[in-house]
Image: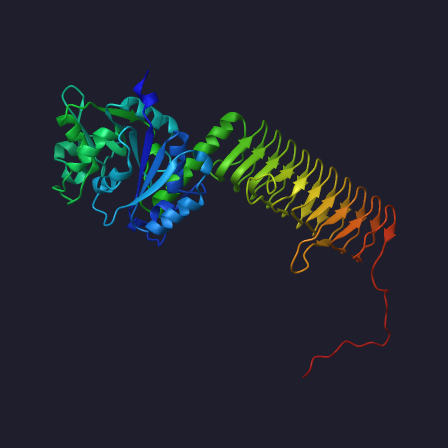
Amino acid sequence: MNQLKQAPLDVVIMAAGKGTRMKSKLPKVLHRLAGRALLQHVVDRAGDLAARRVVVITGHGAAEVEAALKKSRDESSGFDLEFVRQEPQLGTGHAVQQTVPVLPDDGVVVILSGDVPLTQADTLRDLITACNGSHLALLTIDFADPTGYGRIVRSSTGGVQAIVEHKDATPAQHAIQEVYSGIMAVPSKLLKPWLARLDNKNAQGEFYLTDVVKFAVADGVLVVAHKIKDPLQVAGINSPVQLAELERAHQLRRADALMVQGVRLADPARFDVRGELSCGQDVEIDVNCIFEGEVVLGEGVKIGANCIIAHARIDAGAVIHPFTHIDGGSSNAKDQIVVGAGALVGPFARLRPGAKLGEQVHIGNFVEVKNSTLANGAKANHLAYVGDSVLGERVNFGAGSITANYDGANKHKTVIERDVHIGSNCVLIAPVTIGAGGTVGGGSTITKDTAPGVLTVARTKQVSLSNWARPAKKQ
């Protein structure tokens, strides 16, 4: 049986650097790309690889970094998460030395960088395959301008002999275009003794992890390079400019993938996915739209310009008009927003956690819906608030009307049964039920349940006073 399938996988992530060029109080690895911390992207890849253990090396801002990862920890990921600290920071080799006490001897170790967020799981699987449980495998790439990167030095027969850091390279070595990405796979039982042999006799006075290559060669261990062509997968972040460039490149790649599936994007350069977006056939998305969390767009859905949609399912044929904000808060069933088939939402509408809209529901401009269910054909077209409510089929909720669901301490429920018409500028003070087929006259404040089919009006009698003068402004 292949050794790779038998060897447990342990992932080490270097996340101790200060990131001075970010010019931020926030640790570099916590800056966000596509809505997630750089470090979280890397941890997620470890989950994709079915790692046994993930060891994160922290240093600068260690407490903040560790707290952020613990907070976002997905217990279903299946790996043990551990932290070790590198204090002070004396180089990449010194960083990985801190993991020796917590790394078992029976595994393959994959070493990643917390500021390199877009390495794909398939690439890492290929690297692990190249390691084969017995080799030192390096992820490499050719750069036209390799400045700053460690060069891959090969023998006359093509075998990897060493990695030479840029500051230690000779003029001839500077001309080498194949560089080390900072990612390697190596059996733990080989790595540990090599780490013990590291020294800092180099131009930067640091302990280089890359020196393990010369130890492997000296010990007769095969060093293999898995070379890729995709620079995004090895791109690191050192400045806000680089972060913005990688964000755009990443988003454009996601946009291209969606368009290949048939999604029509008005402008791929003005499109952001900060989570997972799934689209059916003939989906159209206008400019400046942001998708967060888990979003599913059904067949023929149309999204207008400048919409924000998070944690939502929008069913076939629904239209979300421009400037609409849909935010389910989370992807659990209770909070996730559902927009039924053929529904119309917006412009300038807001759907908050727990909004469930049936088929052909209309939610118009400046209407807010929270934790409420609207059955098929219900409408709230103008300037309204519906909170903690159940609206039956074909309810017409008038302009300027609200459900007053909060008494200052607790939330209460409003039930509006099928075919009810609520006039303009009404206040329904929960808990209250409006019976099926009933009508509430405009301007009414309703505090008691109403019977089915009746007209209910609750407002003071109109009075007109003659010979009345407005107060005059004092001189």
In the rendered view, tell whether residue 22 sits above or below residue 127.
Answer: below
> Is residue 121 in sight in this rendering?
yes
* Residue visible at 46% across and 30% down in the picture: 256
* Residue visible at 19% across and 36% down in the picture: 195
* Residue visible at 14% across and 26% down in the picture: 219
The percent coordinates of residue 1 (x first, y second) are 33, 15
Q: Nearer the viewer, residue 331 or 85?
A: 85
Q: How many labels does the image show?
A: 0
The percent coordinates of residue 336 (x first, y second) are 59, 40
Q: In which quarter of the image is the C terminus?
A: bottom right
Q: Nearer the viewer, residue 240 or 415?
A: 415
The quarter of the displayed image where residue 235 is located: top left
The quarter of the displayed image where residue 462 is located: bottom right
Colour mode of the rendering? rainbow
Q: Could you tell whether 204 is left or right of 39 in the image? A: left
The percent coordinates of residue 417 (x first, y second) are 79, 44
> Is residue 177 in sight in this rendering?
no
Q: Could you tell whether 436 is left or right of 53 in the image? A: right
The percent coordinates of residue 39 (x first, y second) are 37, 41
Q: Could you tell whether 95 is left or right of 433 in the image? A: left
Q: Residue furthest bottom?
A: 475
Q: Could you tell whether 308 is left or right of 52 in the image? A: right
